[in-house]
Image (cartoon, rainbow, N blue to C red):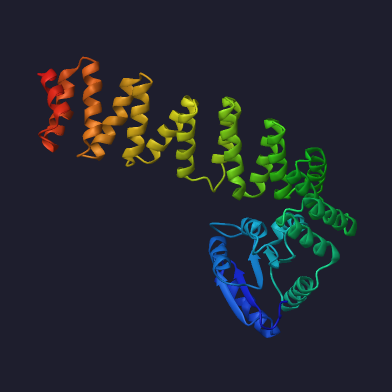
């Protein structure tokens, strides 16, 4: 039970004055005893992972990680998923947040805030958390059954939740999810699609439909729903990566390229992800795309000698020695004491019958290690 006077409140807004204003209004109302303010979604998530919070007031439009992403993390976390959340938004985002609220948030407030609206919304949300309606009770009971492995009971309870509130998409999508876990793909598809059609922001339904169509080996539909999930919530980026890798393994390189292009267009896609996918493509035969990714990384991060070396060595294996020399030479310039790179340069030059060019890297190796046997033997070939 939440004590409205004693509760701990987390306020996440990139405007310090807004955080101060909200906490000030709540103190006037005598709502809450402890207030924690943060300036972006990542900081909010860190607080939630570290200490107990009774109520989250979450700005929708924040830097680093936005409110929608934080909300998604909360609802997917077993320990936090029932946390009451009030989304705060500007009027321009009202429609988006209102639809999202159908399945995820407990209430939303439009800026500018007033004491009256804040009092009304917080009291309603706390009352609902302390005395949940029948639909919520059934869904929570279904979730407990699922966690115990009793999917039959979970399905029955989700069906009751649907009957309690047939207009809500949440029980419909939960029912589809339990069918999916049971392996009943046809009813799962029916309910998940119904939820997705009723709420175009239901990331959970899109995500599970993507998984379902992967099980049905329908990669076209899987891609469509994973893309929808990623458009709403960039945290779903891992689903797109998974789909792209599956397509690479199936040798459907053209579709995989399209999927990865979509993934990389998302704000949360970082260089480490491009490197991961490049390495995966190298290992699974999608060499042309892997080389392109590594070349882009080498251009963006010219001080990354490891990328230059990996790219150069792969090109050597593909017989593109001239191109490989460019990257290996750059890698050697970055690390003045790397014997392996210099030996590889010397081998390539000797294979190309250019002993004079091989002399320099071999001389450098011998300066680093005067007793290096292979370098000494190769140097003799140069002279």
- Residue toward you, 352 or 59: 352
- Which quadrant of the rendered structure holds the C terminus? top left
- Residue toward you, 268 or 59: 268
The percent position of residue 121, horizontal first and vertical second, equals: 76, 72
- Which quadrant of the rendered structure holds the N terminus? bottom right
Residue drawn at point x = 71 percent, y = 44 percent: 208
Q: Is residue 206 above or below residue 24?
A: above
Determine the residue located farthest toward the top in the rendered image.
Answer: 353
Drawn side of residue 17 relative to residue 126, left or right: left
- Residue toward you, 109 or 262: 262
What is the count of numbered marks?
0
The percent position of residue 199, horizontal first and vertical second, equals: 78, 49
Drawn side of residue 132 relative to residue 378, left or right: right
Q: Is residue 192 above or below residue 59?
A: above
Quadrant of the rendered structure where residue 272 is?
top left
The percent position of residue 84, horizontal first and vertical second, equals: 70, 68
Quadrant of the rendered structure where residue 119 is?
bottom right
Drawn side of residue 242 relative to residue 381, left or right: right
Q: Is residue 311 above or below residue 88?
A: above
- Residue toward you, 146 or 105: 146
Is residue 347 among what the camera can see? Answer: yes
Q: Is residue 328 above or below residue 267?
A: above
The percent position of residue 67, horizontal first and vertical second, equals: 63, 59
Is residue 169 among what the camera can see? Answer: no
Residue drawn at point x = 62 percent, y = 57 percent: 73
Determine the residue located farthest toward the right in the rendered image.
Answer: 163
Quadrant of the rendered structure where residue 243 is?
top right
């Amino acid at each position: 039970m939440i004590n409205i006077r004693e509760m701990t409140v987390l306020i996440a807004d990139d405007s310090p004055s807004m955080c101060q204003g909200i906490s000030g209004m709540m103190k006037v109302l005598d709502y809450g005893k402890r207030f924690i303010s943060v300036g972006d979604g990542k900081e909010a998530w860190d607080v939630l992972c570290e200490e107990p919070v009774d109520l989250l007031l979450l700005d929708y439009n924040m830097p680093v990680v936005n409110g929608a992403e934080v909300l998604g993390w909360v609802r997917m976390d077993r320990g936090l998923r029932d946390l009451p959340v009030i989304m705060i938004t500007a009027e321009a985002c009202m429609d988006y947040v209102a639809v999202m609220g159908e399945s995820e948030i407990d209430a939303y407030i439009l800026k500018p805030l007033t004491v009256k609206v804040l009092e009304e919304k917080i009291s309603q949300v706390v009352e609902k958390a302390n005395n949940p309606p029948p639909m919520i009770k059934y869904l929570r009971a279904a979730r407990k059954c699922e966690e115990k492995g009793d999917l039959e009971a979970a399905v029955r309870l989700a069906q009751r939740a649907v009957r309690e509130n047939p207009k809500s998409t949440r029980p419909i999508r939960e029912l589809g999810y339990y069918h999916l876990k049971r392996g009943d793909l046809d009813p799962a598809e029916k309910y998940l699609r119904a939820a997705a059609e009723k709420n175009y922001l239901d990331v959970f339904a899109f995500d599970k439909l993507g998984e379902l169509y992967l099980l049905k080996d329908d990669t076209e539909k899987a891609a469509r729903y994973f893309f929808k999930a990623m458009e709403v919530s960039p945290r779903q980026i891992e689903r797109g990566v998974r789909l792209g890798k599956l397509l690479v393994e199936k040798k459907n390189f053209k579709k995989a390229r399209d999927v990865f292009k979509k993934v990389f267009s998302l704000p949360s896609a970082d260089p480490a992800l491009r490197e991961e996918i490049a390495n995966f493509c190298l290992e699974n035969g999608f060499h042309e795309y892997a080389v392109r990714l590594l070349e882009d990384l080498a251009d963006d991060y010219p001080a990354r000698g490891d990328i230059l070396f990996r790219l150069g060595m792969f090109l050597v294996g593909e017989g593109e020695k001239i191109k490989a020399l460019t990257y290996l030479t750059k890698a050697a310039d970055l690390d003045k004491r790397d014997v392996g790179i210099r030996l590889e340069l010397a081998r390539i030059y000797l294979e190309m019958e250019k002993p004079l060019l091989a002399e320099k890297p071999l001389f450098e190796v011998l300066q680093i290690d005067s007793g290096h046997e292979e370098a000494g033997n190769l140097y003799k070939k140069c002279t």
